[in-house]
Image: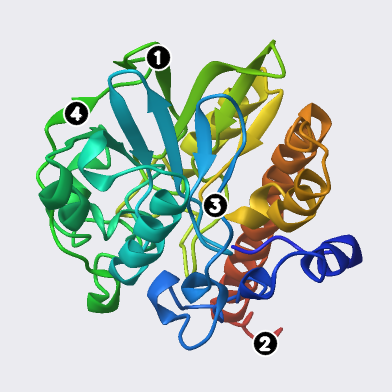
Amino acid sequence: MKLALGGALVAAILAVPAQAQTQPAAPAPGQGPSDVKGPDANHTAFPAFKITDHMYYVGGANLGSYIIKTAKGLILVNTGFTYNTPMIEKSMADLGFKVKDIKILLISHAHIDHDAGAVEFIAKSGAKYYVMEGDADVVESGGKLDYNYGDDPKEYYPAAHVDKVLHDGDTVSLGEITLTAHLTPGHTKGDTTWTFTDNLNGKARKVVIVGGPLTNRAMKIINNPKYPNLVADYAKNFAVLRSLPADIFVGPHGYYYDLPTKYAKWKAGDSEAFVDPAGYKAFVDRAEAAFARAKTKEEEALAAAAATAKPAAPPAG
C-alpha cells in the first residue's frame, strides 16, 4: 500500500540525481508487487550512501536494501527483485564493499520485492539466511505459501533455504553489531522489524528498520480463512512499533521515511538528515489509520452485501 506523497516529497525528488527521480509506482487494487512494470521506481537506481557509522543504503529509488558493516563482515537486509541484484552489487561496489563479504542475509518480510534475490546473493557470498517464523516456510516455498499472494504465480520467486528460523526477540550478532528481531505480523505472518544501536556524529542512536505495517493488495481483512488472526496481528504490529525508541528509521520502501527529501538534505551537508523520531511516530500513525480505513471499508461492504441479500418482508395481510 502506498502512502500519500506530498508536495515536499515531489520537490525533494527534483533535488536528487536524475537516476533517483522516479516516484514509486502504485499498483492498481488487486495487483501485487510484481505487477508494477516498465520504467518505474522498482527498476530505478538510487545513490549509495552512509546513514550511520555502520549502516549504508544500497537499495533503489523505491526498494530499500541496507548493508550493515562489521569487523567480521557484512549483513545485507533485503535483496529486492531478482533484477535488482546488479543494482545492489553496483551500489556496494561504489561504497567499496564486496558481495563475497556478506555473512548474513536478513529480510523485512517474505514478499517478492524484498527477498527474490536471496538465492543469488547466497550463491555469490555463502551468506547464512535468517528468517522469522511465519515467513520461513514462505521463503522456502518461493512465495507459494504466502497467505495473500500464494495463489498468484506472478508473485513467486526462487525458493531459498533458511539456515535459521528466528523468533520474536531473537538477536543476530556479527562483529560489534547486534540486531534484535521484532515480530510485527500482519503484512506477512513473519513480518520483521529490526532494531540496533549505532553511532552518528559520536552519539549513540536507536535505529529501526521497519518491517511492513501497510495493507496488501486485494487483502481480505475480516475473517480471512488463510489468516484468522490478521486483525489481531496488525494490532500487535502497531503496538510493537509504538513501543520501539527510534532516533533513525528506515524500511523496505523509501517512501516509508521520505528517502528523497532526507537524501537531498544529507547530500547538502546535513549529516543528521535521517534523525527523525517525530517522523517515525507520524509514519506509524499514518499506517495504523490506513489499516483502520481499509478495515472499515471492508466492514461496510460486507454490511451492504448482507443487507442486499436479506429476504424482503412478506406483504402485509
Q: At 33% from the left edge and 66% from the top edge, which residue is drawn?
A: 86
Q: Quadrant of the C terminus?
A: bottom right
Q: CA distance from mark 3 to mark 1?
A: 23 Å
| Residue ID for mark 1 | 178
Q: CA distance from mark 1 to mark 2?
A: 72 Å
Where's residue 102, x and y in %? Answer: 26, 37
Looking at the rendered structure, the secondary structure element under dot 4 is strand
126 sits to left or right of 45: left
53 sits to left or right of 280: left
Q: Specify the amino acid type for callout 2.
A: Pro
Where's residue 185, x and y in %? Answer: 43, 37
Q: At 62% from the left edge and 83% from the top edge, which residue is drawn?
A: 314
| Residue ID for mark 3 | 48
Residue 313 visible, this angle: yes
Using the image, tell me which numbered label, if any, was put on residue 165: 4
Q: Earlier in the sequence, mark 4 or mark 1?
A: 4
111 sits to left or right of 257: left
Looking at the rendered structure, the secondary structure element under dot 1 is strand
How crowded is the residue under tag 1: few (<14 C-alpha within 10 Å), some, or many (20+)?
some
